[in-house]
Image (tube, rainbow, N blue to C red):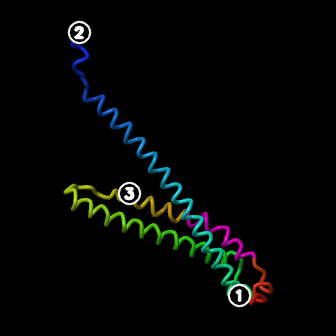
Amino acid sequence: TRDEEAYDVSNQSDVLDTMDDVTNTMSLLLAGIAAISLLVGGIGIMNIMLVSVTERTREIGIRKAVGAKRKHIMLQFLCEACILSVLGGLIGLALSIEIIEIYNLIAKAAVAMNWSVAIAAIAFCALIGVLFGGYPAAKASRLQPIDALHTS
């Protein structure tokens, strides 16, 4: 029998390459999950803002009747959607910081937050708020004062 099959030789660079592949795959998976979460969050913000427009139709009518322009109404609802989105991002960031602290205590590790990524995430939350708040804001700004005041 041959003794070549009795042992295996591996190179550390092969192990490193495999770990890089695994890390890249996990990064892509997490990015996909994050994208789906942002889409769902954006749809949630849009629905909340649509309900807000419906409930505040009379207020919008009064504002337009006393001289508010379309851009003022639109800006108000875009700001509200952006604030909702950024607050959600800040809550998520605070939870992340707490989870990192708990992990560091339990695992006795030294994991740290990448603050440039955190700031980019909050900026992206603001973008999501503007993108998904655009339709409700446009809907609110297009209301005619007489129609808005006529609703009960």
Residue carrying label 1: 58
Name above or below for residue 3 compared with residue 67.
Answer: above
Q: Quadrant of residue 141?
A: bottom right
Mark 2 or mark 1, which is nearer to you?
2
- Mark identifier at residue 116: 3
Left/right placement of residue 106 relative to residue 54 reads left
- Write the residue at 71% across / 87% down: 58
Q: CA distance from mark 2 to mark 1?
A: 91 Å
* 131 within the magenta span: yes
Residue carrying label 2: 1
Q: Quadrant of the C terminus?
A: bottom right
Mark 1 or mark 3, which is nearer to you?
1
Left/right placement of residue 26 relative to residue 12 reads right
Name above or below for residue 9 compared with residue 126.
Answer: above
The image shows residue 92 at horizontal and vertical percentages of: 42, 66
Q: Earlier in the sequence, mark 1 or mark 3?
A: 1
Q: Which residues are magenta?
A: 128-142
The image shows residue 2 at horizontal and vertical percentages of: 23, 10
Left/right placement of residue 48 relative to residue 37 reads right
Q: Nearer the viewer, residue 22 or 86?
A: 22
Which amino acid, by three-letter code, is at mark 2? Thr
Magenta stretch: dominant secondary structure: helix
Which amino acid, by three-letter code, is at mark 1? Arg
* Secondary structure category for the residue under label 2: loop
The image shows residue 124 at horizontal and vertical percentages of: 50, 60
